[in-house]
């Protein structure tokens, strides 16, 4: 009886396994994207943020940022690109281990760690955007008094003649789905416990 009590119910266990696999797949796709539109760039410019690198129109964006005093984007300047793949990978593996071992204890630990990671990642991304958009070079060729260039955390923001869209990329949507599955698995598991099923 005690052994059964420490097991994950079947449906939450399946959901947990899928959530873990999705997190591992995230490592192969960009997590977030920032799209810039302007009259002089009708095709738009794109910046993709992966767990370990930046891709897209990085050099063009760096060239434009020079004029308004924003720092250039270089992967080596972000410690996140060093640790993020390991954190996401560890979360995916932990979920799979909890699924294989059918351990409710590991499942609950994973839920807590995933929640802390999610909150921490959003805060870190916001602070990064804030620092990037506010700490400007005072000797920049183009200066607009009182103007800052912080891209939006999510959604749209007008930055001079550029429209900036910040939205999840494929990896980001996979993480959102993984989090939703985790929440659903936890809810079902707790409901089973409450109903003693």
Image (spheres, helix red, strand yellow):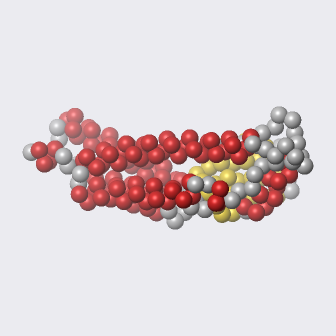
Does residue 172 appear anywhere in the picture? yes
Identify the residue at horizontal 71%, vertical 56% (top origin): 73
Quadrant position of the C terminus in the picture: top left
Query: Farthest bottom residue?
Result: 28
User: Where residue 39 appears, x then y in whole percent?
Assistant: 85, 53
Of residue 90 and residue 180, the one placed in the foreground of this image is: 90
Q: Say which quarter of the image contains residue 148.
A: top right
The outermost residue toward the right is 141
Q: Is residue 138 left or right of residue 18?
A: right
* Outermost residue to the left: 1
How many labels, in total?
0
x%, y% of residue 135?
Answer: 75, 42
Q: Position of residue 35 (x, y in %)?
A: 70, 53
Please name whichever residue, 182 or 133, is drawn nearer the observer in this view of the structure.
133
Write the residue at 68% across / 41% down.
130
Residue at coordinates 69% horizontally, 63% vertically from top-left? 56
Q: Which residue does the image show at 60% across and 46% down from the upper left? A: 125
Q: Quadrant of the N terminus?
A: top left
**Residue 168 x %, y %:** 58, 51
- Give the side of residue 104 with respect to residue 160, left or right: left
């Amino acid at each position: 009886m005690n052994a059964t009590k420490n097991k994950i119910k079947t449906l939450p266990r399946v959901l947990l396994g899928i959530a873990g696999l999705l997190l591992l797949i995230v490592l192969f796709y960009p997590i977030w994207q920032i799209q810039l539109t302007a009259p002089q760039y009708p095709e738009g410019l794109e910046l993709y943020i992966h767990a370990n690198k930046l891709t897209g129109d990085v050099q063009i964006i760096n060239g434009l940022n020079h004029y308004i005093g924003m720092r250039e984007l270089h992967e080596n300047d972000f410690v996140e690109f060093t640790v993020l793949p390991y954190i996401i990978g560890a979360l995916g593996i932990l979920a799979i281990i909890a699924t294989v071992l059918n351990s409710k204890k590991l499942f609950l630990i994973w839920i807590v760690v995933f929640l802390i990671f999610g909150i921490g990642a959003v805060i870190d991304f916001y602070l990064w955007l804030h620092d990037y958009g506010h700490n400007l070079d005072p000797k920049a060729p183009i200066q607009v008094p009182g103007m800052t260039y912080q891209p939006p955390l999510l959604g749209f923001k007008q930055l001079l003649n550029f429209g900036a869209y910040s939205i999840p990329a494929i990896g980001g949507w996979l993480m959102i789905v993984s989090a939703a599955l985790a929440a659903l698995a936890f809810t079902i598991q707790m409901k089973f416990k409450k109903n003693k099923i």
